[in-house]
Amino acid sequence: MELKQQLKLSQQLVMTPQLQQAIRLLQLSRLELLDEVRKELDGNPILTDEEPDARKSRAAEENGGVASVRPEPGESEARAEREDHRPTAEGRETATATKEVDWEKFLENSSQQQSGAPKGPTGFDELPPIEQSLTRPGSLQDHLLWQLQLGDFTDVERRFGELVIGNLDDNGFLDLKGVERPDGTRTPDLTIDDLADEAELHRDDAPLVLEMIQNFDPLGVAARDLQECLLIQARVLGFDEIEMQILERHMGNLERRNYQAIARDLKIPVEEVYEAAKEIQKLESRPARNFTDQDERSIGITPDVFVIKDGEEFVVMDNDRGLQRLHINEALTQKLLKDPSAKDFVGEKLKNAQWLIRAIEQRRKTIIRVTECIVEKQRDFFEHGVEHLKPMILRDVAEAVNMHESTISRVTTNKYVHTPRGLFELKYFFNSSIRRVADEDIASESVKQAIKKIVDEEDKKNPYSDQAIVKFLEDSSGIKIARRTVAKYREMLGILSSSKRKKLF
């Protein structure tokens, strides 16, 4: 054992608070950035979203119409600009007092720092906010709780009903399976009796109350599986005996469309099974279909950038509509700096304001730069459509714009671009490659669209199998792809297998 001194030289990245803020702002979506700007405006009195000209006009009104001393008519614009930016004695004293903040130098460069962003609308003066012009239906839980309150239930039964409604999944089925804990373990599965015990309802009464809830609108809600859901609807709608037997005994054959097996077991003609299947198909397999907590019709996406075709070129423009431009409130700052006890506070707020304005501007420039690179590499897509989308990975753009892949990932997540081809998330343009037989590789997204087109145009009475789609792709487009890959892409597109797509009537 001995004590020893050792000198070591190493490199490491120090994440300053300002760098952390810049990275965090870069990965925020547009709506999240708007919230962040509002929070900073509320918490930093040095920041303002008013244009300097507007503040000068307001100050002129308060001072009897005199805002500033203007140069003589014969004085040049250059001299006026030099006078505006000439350091004053008060500014030098302020800089000395705040030490780490060079206030005069900051004021000299403030107009240059903020001139990079194009001017545009700074609020919602022309149109109301999007949330005021859209609506959506109520959630399934709200709809069921309203019926529960209007029903003839005791307080204990109502508590049990609230527990049932609170355990519905996105499809409207009763889900009592355990959930995964943060440590990787799972909670035990629940039963109807467990819910009854928690609500202090007698276990014998629980099935009756559950049955009453299952007959709420929509019919079949709170069922424990698809079969129970369809049976509830069939009983209420008065289905005949054959249809009830098919639902009770032949759900598997019904899903596989194995009507001959059903006909043999029930000893009835297959035509009757066809007719029964037609009626069963009219039932709702997903009770929560029209009741979702986040209805897609109420979502309005505002693009971060626009891609506009100007002649033969595609131009990238940022969208600053609704995004407040931030400025330094110089008058308030100078007034506060006259108070010696406030100088440290003002200096800290000035640094925060300066870094925030720079970070937002850097975010804007980075998004435009990355979008321009994407447009350059995916020009065929913008010209001809999704069939011409090229394979592209993060590294391709990162090397072109001299940035790290993680930065490209942050820039393209939750950022949207409006193009002549529609509205897309920036990361939509990044695709893995699929090999062609005698041509350049094709993007996986293009292959998905090709599969969708094949299925849309197929004979519904004789749909293509996955292997047939493989052969069709290779013969028509030279795309060499495995059958299991076709199955994976088909499932991602929400397309059923060929046996379930087949239309017999």
Image: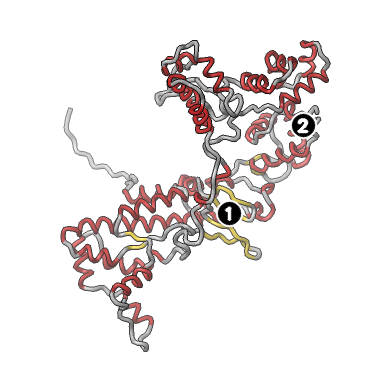
State the SS at label 2. loop
Residue 431 seen from this side:
yes
Pick the front one: 267 or 317: 267
Within-10-Å neighbours for mark 1: few <14, some 14–19, many 20+? many
Residue corresponding to mark 1: 418
Q: Earlier in the sequence, mark 1 or mark 2?
A: 1
Residue corresponding to mark 2: 464
Residue 239 locus on image (x, y percent): 71, 20
Query: Which image quarter is the N terminus in?
Result: top left
Q: Residue furthest bottom?
A: 74
- Does the CB distance between marks 1 and 2 fall below 8 Å? no
Give the number of the mark in front: 1 or 2.
1
State the SS at label 1. strand
- What residue is drawn where x is 62% and y is 64%? 310
Rendered position, 98 above or below 10? below
Pick the front one: 485 or 84: 84
User: How many badges with numbers are in the image?
Assistant: 2
